[in-house]
Image (cartoon, rainbow, N blue to C red):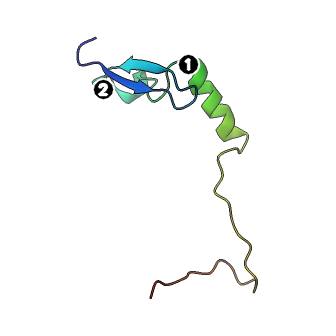
C-alpha cells in the first residue's frame, strides 16, 4: 500500500490502514470492514441516527432564537 494512512473504525474502534488515493466507490473508509459498513447501514435504516426534535409550546412550528 503506497501512501497508506491509519484510522480508527467509527463502528468498532479497530485501527486499520487505508489508501486515500483509492476512489470512494472502491473504499470502505471510514469502516475497517464490510461488516462494519453494513452495521452502520442497518443503523441508518432502523432510524437510530436521528436528530432530536423539541416540541414547540405555541404549536406554530419550530422557533428560531436570535443571539443578542
Residue located 62% across and 25% down the image: 38
Quarter holding residue 12: top right
Q: Give x and y (percent) for residue 49.
A: 64, 46
Report whether 54 appears left or right of 30: right
Q: CA distance from mark 1 to mark 2?
A: 17 Å
Residue at the disc numbered 1: 34
Dot 1, how many residues are within 10 Å of its Cα: few (below 14), some (14-19), or many (20+)?
few
Identify the image quadrant of the C terminus: bottom left
Furthest residue in direction top, as rendered: 1
User: Where residue 20 is drawn, which disc sits there?
Assistant: 2
Residue 4 rendering spot, x and y as whole percentages: 29, 18
Query: Sequence order check: which comes first, mark 1 or mark 2?
Result: 2
From the top left corner, tell me how far across and down residue 22 is, in percent: 32, 22
Q: How many marks?
A: 2
Mark 2 crowd level (few <14, some 14–19, many ≥20, 10 Å Cα):
few
> Farthest residue toward the left?
2
Q: In this image, 1 relative to 53: left or right? A: left
Secondary structure at badge 1 equals helix
Up-down: is 5 above or below 55?
above
For residue 49, the mark is none
Q: Nearer the viewer, residue 66 or 27?
A: 66
Question: SS at mark 2?
Answer: loop
Q: Position of residue 36 (x, y in %)?
A: 58, 24
Amino acid at each position: 500500500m503506497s501512501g497508506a494512512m491509519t484510522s480508527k473504525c467509527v463502528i468498532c474502534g479497530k485501527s486499520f490502514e487505508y489508501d486515500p488515493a483509492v476512489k470512494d466507490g472502491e473504499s470502505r473508509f471510514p469502516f475497517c470492514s464490510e461488516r462494519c459498513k453494513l452495521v452502520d447501514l442497518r443503523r441508518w435504516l432502523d432510524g437510530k441516527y436521528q436528530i432530536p426534535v423539541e416540541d414547540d409550546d405555541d404549536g406554530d412550528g419550530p422557533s428560531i432564537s436570535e443571539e443578542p
